[in-house]
Image (cartoon, helix red, strand yellow):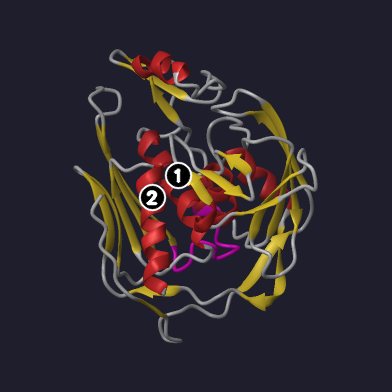
Amino acid sequence: MQPRTSQTTPSSPEEQSPVSLQHTLAGEIQQSGVGLHSGEKTSVRLLPAPVDAGRYFVRVDLPESPAIAAKVSSVTQTVLSTQLEQNEAKIRTVEHLLAALAGMGVDNVRIEINGAEVPLLDGSAALWVEAIAQVGVVAQDKPRVTPAVISEPIWVRHDDAFVAAIPASEIRFTYGIDFDLPAIGNQWYSWSPGNRIAAYPSTASFASEIAPARTFGLAHQIDFLQQQGLIKGGSLDNALVCTQEGWLNPPLRFANEPVRHKILDLIGDLSLLGNLPLAHFVAYKASHNLHVQLAQQIVASRR
């Protein structure tokens, strides 16, 4: 890997939108389902949390219910999902839920879970987003931390795959993928939520354009991955599966659903920064590992 870092600086009053307050959920949300990799069923409760609490998980199935902060410093593994760990308590496949919370403007939330993996649900963030929209999000009595501004490009690459944060006037995500399968091929998509990723209540674009995009897999890799103890809970009900002949479980929700899902993953991984810096995030053939490395470089640049 060849990272490059630079300094970040606070945005000036002229560069930022009006002061944005922190937000939390207006009520409780419950979901349950099977984990993508473990194949085990878990139940999740999302609960309102006080200002400055951030987004954090609580393993209610473990003694003393240990908490795991959804922060870059908590990441311990990035093999086909993002895993967080704190004091030996682990939680895996957090990216879709965290993307939904960030995209819907939820800064502070207590996430109680009775197992080691967040349920995959339908393979997207849509069911989380629908539940958040139904219960509502409420403003709290303290402003969000002013986002930093990326003043010089920060990037990480491995071979021809890369992910970068580039100076920009608004937050934007651009992603490219390239697969040797006709049904996927080369896809690019660019999307912006406006000046702030969590600019509640301007969440309609995230809910309609990014959240519904489902995870996808390649049929010829399934047996190998399952032999490695991965994707035990994957099925045609919670993931798109592609072969040389085409998709096993059409129709797609978007013609370019795979690359939109990669943006969903990127948002979830970068949400570990808390309040995203003002930048254009550009990725090509990247992975959770590269996403997290970029987040780590951004943290390092703040120091």
- Residue that label 2 marks: 291
Mark toward the viewer: 2 or 1:
2
- Circle 2: element type: helix
Q: Is residue 90 left or right of residue 297?
A: right
* Picture coordinates of residue 291, whole percent (x, y): 38, 50
In the rendered image, residue 209 lying in the magenta stretch gets the answer no
Amino acid tagged 2? His
Q: Nearer the viewer, residue 87 or 138?
A: 87
- Residue that label 1 marks: 265
Tell me, yes or no, if residue 177 can be seen here. yes
In the rendered image, residue 199 lying in the magenta stretch gets the answer yes
The residue sitting at 61% across, 46% down in the picture is 129
Q: Which residues are magenta?
A: 194-205
Secondary structure character of the magenta stretch overall: loop
Amino acid tagged 1? Asp
Tell me, yes or no, if residue 249 can be seen here. no
The residue sitting at 62% across, 35% down in the picture is 117
Q: Residue furthest left?
A: 160
